[in-house]
Amino acid sequence: MSVLVATAAAVMMVLMVGVAVNRRTIHRVAADRSSPGSDAVHDNRSRRQLTRCVAGFRRRRAERFLRDVDASTVAALLDRTARQCASGQSLTRSFAESLHASPIAPLFATTSAAIDGGQSVDQALEHQSMSQPNVALAVHAIRLCARQGGNVSESLDRAASTLRDRAAASHERHAQSAQARLSARVLTVLPIAFGGWTIATTPSVQRFVLTPAGLACISAGLALNVVGWYSMSRVVKRPG
């Protein structure tokens, strides 16, 4: 029961802070709408804001997808390509068929379109984004095989083995940082829970929270809590 009370108090704090911060903005928007010709201006502004929000959401989604690509997934793509090459198919056709069956095919959409248009795998991968290190290793290995030839299957198997070693090291770091992630969560939730409990059980604190100074203190505390959580998360996720 006490946990529910603390949670409800924390939610009420956030709502009060939001109302206090946005009250002036709401009045200004209402005044703008009451002026002549403001409807068209407001509609255009809303469309531009919506377009920027959608574009930003898509960009963050693509960046998150690229950041979360696991090395083992890229290694599986190289393994499948090596098997296709060992069966007698060309490197271009083997990579194209393997790519269509891979979960990271959206990352190679431009490359797939270029291969379907008749370009070789070396030409198609020329403009491939390589901001993700695992993808960059795979692209370099495939382009090197396309240029130098030789035992393509063996070269791709070695590159896939390197990627699997990277995946194993990444999983080991993730397991070792479990305690640090737990500490970050505890240090983030504990101040909010303690503050909510104090507000729910102490009348003097309740009266102070409803004052402008109290709202300012709560806002500053929540902001510092978010900054601390973000900083600790960056430290934990930083590659070793």
Image (tube, rainbow, N blue to C red):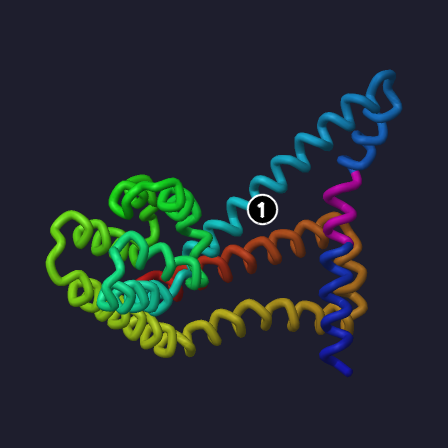
* Quadrant position of the N terminus in the picture: bottom right
Q: Give above or below for 194 relative to 214.
A: below
Query: For the magenta stretch, what is the residue range?
Result: 16-23
**Relative depth, front residue between 101 and 25:** 101
Mark 1: secondary structure: helix
Residue at position x 31%, y 62% in the image: 239
From the viewer's perspective, is 137 left or right of 180?
A: left
Snapshot quadrant of residue 200: bottom right
Snapshot quadrant of residue 202: bottom right
> Can residue 50 be seen in this snapshot?
yes
Q: Amino acid at mark 1?
A: Phe
From the viewer's perspective, is 99 left or right of 34?
A: left
* Quadrant position of the C terminus in the picture: bottom left
Task: Give neighbour class at mark 1: few <14, some 14-19, many 20+ (Cα, 10 Å).
Answer: few
Residue at position x 65%, y 72% in the image: 193
* Dominant secondary-structure state across the stretch colored magenta: helix
- The percent position of residue 19, horizontal first and vertical second, equals 78, 48
Q: Residue furthest bottom?
A: 1
Task: Identify the residue position indicated by label 1 in the image.
Answer: 57
**Relative depth, front residue between 206 and 131:** 131
